[in-house]
Image: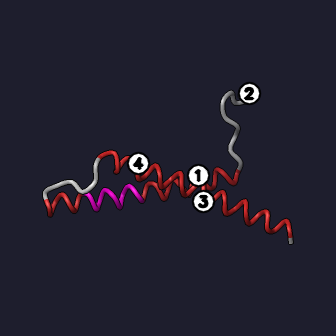
Amino acid sequence: MGKPIFFRPMTAQEKKGWNKGIYVGFYTYLIVLFINFSYETFASGSLFSAQTLFWSGIAAAFITELIYVFVQKRRHSQADHT
């Protein structure tokens, strides 16, 4: 397949972090959509804007991935010092 032109391949640790982030982002979408749907049903108005709904899941996925990778690197570096 050759070398990637723009991006380097993800490490196993980064792949694992991204997979965890995807799950958190998906469940964030489910929760936010459920809250918004419930509010629309009972209050006949939208609680969250479309942009908020869109960015909430994406932000949750990326933030979870960053935190996971940071924590794993920190644990790995602490294990090397002992």
Report if residue 78 lies within the magenta region: no
Discs 2/4, front: 4
Identify the amino acid type marked 3.
Answer: Ile
Identify the main secondary structure in magenta. Answer: helix
Give the secondary structure at mark 2.
Answer: loop
Q: Which residue is mark 2?
A: 2
Q: Which residue is mark 3?
A: 67
Discs 2/3, front: 3
Tell me if mark 2 has few (under 14), some (14-19) or many (20+) residues whose alpha carbon lies within 10 angstroms of its own.
few
- Going from the N terminus, do you reach mark 1 or mark 2 first? 2
Real-space Cα distance between discs 2 and 4? Answer: 34 Å
Find the magenta span and give its range: 28-36
Identify the amino acid type marked 1.
Answer: Trp
Q: Are marks 4 and 3 in contact (CB under 8 Å)?
A: no
Real-space Cα distance between discs 3 and 1? Answer: 10 Å
Which disc number belongs to residue 18?
Answer: 1
- Going from the N terminus, do you reach mark 2 or mark 3 first? 2
User: Residue drawn at (64%, 50%), measured in percent from left and top?
Assistant: 15
> Residue 4 at what x, y percent from top left?
69, 30
> Residue 74 at what x, y percent from top left?
73, 63
Tell me where residue 43 sits by quadrant: bottom left
User: Residue drawn at (70%, 40%), measured in percent from left and top?
Assistant: 9
State which quarter of the image contains the N terminus.
Answer: top right
Q: Nearer the viewer, residue 2 or 59?
A: 59
Give the secondary structure at mark 1.
Answer: helix
Which disc number belongs to residue 72?
Answer: none
Q: Which residue is mark 4?
A: 55
Tell me if mark 1 has few (under 14), some (14-19) or many (20+) residues whose alpha carbon lies within 10 angstroms of its own.
many
Give the secondary structure at mark 3.
Answer: helix
Real-space Cα distance between discs 1 and 2? Answer: 23 Å
Identify the amino acid type marked 2.
Answer: Gly
